[in-house]
Image (cartoon, rainbow, N blue to C red):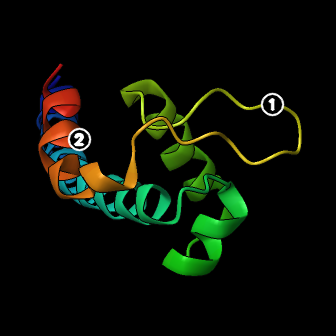
Amino acid sequence: MKQETERGNTMNSFEKADRAASAHASEFRDLDVEIAAYIVVTRQFGSTSMLQRFMRIGFAKAGAIMAELERIGIVTAQQGAKAREVLVPASEAGNLAALVKQAAAA
């Protein structure tokens, strides 16, 4: 019985650490999305491979960021192998941080 209690407490500790790590990762994810949004909007070109090159990240992370940019409304949905259309004009690049933060809060 005592072992189960100890294990339960250990799991709670792991769960707490996992939540803290998730919150920390979320902050970095938001920053990555802000950076990616700036790159995509200023260049008016949205592709996963471009994000990989400019941000020096892997395909999976670049794809996840691109999906988030789509969710926020910065780029269109994927259309085969073509680059995504950028929906935000380059003149709005200065307002991207607020847009990303607002979308993250929603």
- Give percent across and percent down for residue 16: 12, 41
Inspect the image, locate mark 1, and give the three-letter code of the amino acid beneath it.
Gln
| Residue behind mark 2 | 100
Q: Amino acid at mark 2?
A: Val
Towards the viewer: 39 or 48: 39
Q: Residue at x 24, y 45 (%)?
A: 22
Q: Position of residue 32 (x, y in %)?
A: 34, 61
Residue at the (40%, 40%) spot, across then down: 88
What residue is disc 1 on?
A: 79
Query: Mark 1 packing: few (<14 Cα in 10 Å), some, or many (20+)?
Result: few
Q: Which SS class for mark 2?
A: helix
The reply to whether residue 17 is in sight is no
Query: At which x and y percent is residue 14?
Result: 22, 45
* SS for callout 1: loop
Q: Check disc 2: other Cα within 10 Å, few if <14, some if 14-19, many if 20+.
A: many
Q: Report whether 56 appears left or right of 3.
A: right
Seen in the picture, residue 99 relative to 47 is either above or below; the reply is above
Residue 92 or 40: which is nearer the viewer? Answer: 92
- Mark earlier in primary sequence (1, 2): 1
Residue 9 visible to an observer of this rendering: yes
Q: Quadrant of residue 78?
A: top right
Q: Quadrant of the N terminus?
A: top left
Question: Which corner quadrant of the image does residue 7 belong to?
Answer: top left
Is 15 placed above or below 55 here? above
- Does 34 sit left or right of 43 as displayed? left
Quadrant placement of the C terminus = top left
Verify CB contact (< 8 Å) between mark 1 and mark 2.
Answer: no
Distance in Å between CA atoms under marks 1 and 2: 23 Å
Q: Is residue 22 above or below residue 102?
A: below
